[in-house]
Image: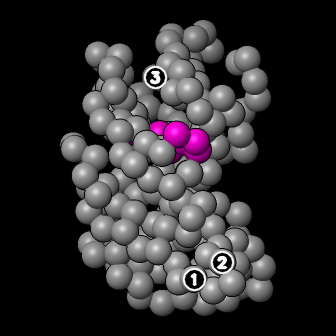
Amino acid sequence: AGIGFGSASVAVAESTVFAGTLTGEVRALDLRTGRETGSYDFGVSMFGTPVVLGARIFVGLSGDGENLVCFNLRTGRTEWKARTADIESSVLYAGGRIVAAGLDGSVAAFDTATGEEIWIYALPETRGRPGIRSSPSSDGSRVFAGTDAGEVIALDLATGALLWKTSVGGPVF
């Protein structure tokens, strides 16, 4: 890669490894040989692990406003882009949707087929809104995320409603 990789893991789907760079490139490597089989440059920083679903890859980006992208691996074309806050974590596939956390303190869910926003939750303003740099996770009915302000939040996966939050004593990255 022309520049380093972030701290996120690579994604593996079937016989391909997908790795994102800090300049926004995704490199596809053959799992058996390590040889590059393809790449695409999204043009802005990618800090997290992409999600691969069949022939589509979903990436969270930090920089241009349309920071959630669905790219078709077979056609080599972008299927859709969604306007979000800067994303500096991995995106999540849960409950049939893509969930992304933003540096503006938001967590949002998007339709995988269209990129339409299904719901958004924003942390309340308290001495400036803390960001979210941790990757969201899910147990199938809830979404969890840690905040820069040292809280872990639980949201309803179907609606985005806040279920609970708790302080953990320090920022969660």
Report the front residue among 124 and 154.
124
Quadrant where the image shows the N terminus = top right
Residue ID for mark 2: 128
* Residue at image point 50% right, 19% down: 40
Residue 11 position in % (x across, y down):
53, 37
Whole-number angstrom distance, CA of label 2 to CA of label 3: 44 Å
Residue 3 is one of the magenta-drawn residues: no
Q: Amino acid at mark 2?
A: Gly
Q: Is residue 54 left or right of residue 167?
A: left
Residue 17: in sight, yes or no? no
Q: Quadrant of residue 160?
A: bottom left
Residue 162 position in % (x across, y down):
41, 84
The magenta stretch is: 58-64
Whole-number angstrom distance, CA of label 3 to CA of label 1: 45 Å
Residue ID for mark 3: 15
Residue 84: in sight, yes or no? yes
Q: Amino acid at mark 3?
A: Ser
Residue ID for mark 1: 125
Instruction: Count the numbered circles shown.
Output: 3
Q: Are marks 2 and 1 in contact (CB under 8 Å)?
A: yes
